[in-house]
Amino acid sequence: MTTWQDLLNPGGATDFFSRREFPPFEPEVAFEYSRINALWLAELSRLVYRQDIEERISVPRPTRASFLDRAGLKQRAFFASPEMDTHAMLVEPKVPPSFAILVFRGTDSKRDYVTDFESGILPWDRNEIGVHKGFRKALDSVWDEIEKELSELVCPIFYTGHSLGGALATLAASRYKPQAVYTYGSPRVGNDAFVRSLQTLPIHRVVDNKDATAWLPPEVLGFRHVGLLQLLTEPQTEAKEKPFFAPLKVFEEPPRILADHAPVNYVDRI
């Protein structure tokens, strides 16, 4: 059962990297969808929601850093914008092979919701690149620091994120080319011209079943999805809601279109 905690506070979990077996990461794989890499990046997209010493004096235990350490990773840098409440971490393995993963945090604050809904108006000229205004502002707030760190790396770099984090990862790929991008429950980011500008990049767009966030912003406003869709399906073993009790169950667990957005379901269903 998916809980409201799973959906609204994914960083509050304490089972990171323990729900599944994680085979070695495949840094050489780019254009081909790698289920192994998708699993790692989904878990990191869940873990980035957990706050650590960069944000709080008193941090939850075990710390985000300790979970990374258990998984054989370490944090190279953490990026935070007080103004936009945008957060991301750059991690790398403790031992070879060498690679790096830039992980953007999704929506977890009131300011993030403002960012999500500040879509703006796309250009009328379909040949002019247009992107979501709020997403652009959020990435701008941390981009100078991120670009500086990325420019110092000589290894395959992967971008990832869940929800708003997936949108920021996609937008970042338009500024600094990665090895590959994996997004989870990402909203649409830009118009047709933006999509065409990224058509040579390996962008894997993972969507869980009925995740409603993937429907936003509406296509009627000119927004389009980027990348190849990898649609996850609901396990047959999951209990189906009985219509008579469905109104009562909303107090115990979120409805399916919201539950399918929970980061933990992406990890479990890949």
Image (cartoon, rainbow, N blue to C red):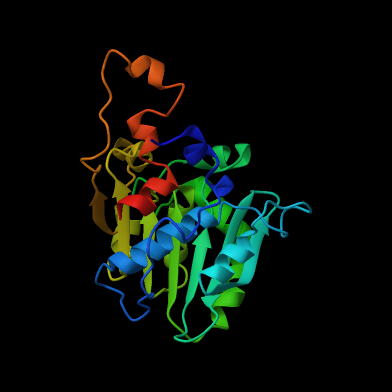
In this picture, is 16 found above or below 76?
A: above
**Residue at the (62%, 40%) spot, across then down:** 111
State the residue lying farthest toward the right: 57
Asked if residue 23 lies left or right of residue 56, the reply is left
Residue 188: horizontal and vertical position, in percent?
Answer: 37, 47
Which of these two is toward me, 70 or 87?
A: 70
State the residue lying farthest toward the top: 244
Q: Specify whether residue 153 is in view.
A: yes
Residue 219: horizontal and vertical position, in percent?
Answer: 30, 40
Asked if residue 113 lies left or right of residue 185, the reply is right
Residue 254: horizontal and vertical position, in percent?
Answer: 42, 29
The quadrant holding residue 109 is top right
Q: Specify whether residue 226 is in view.
A: no
Asked if residue 55 lies left or right of residue 102, the reply is right
Instruction: Indicate the quadrant containing the N terminus: top left, top right, bottom left or bottom right.
Output: top left
Q: How many marks?
A: 0
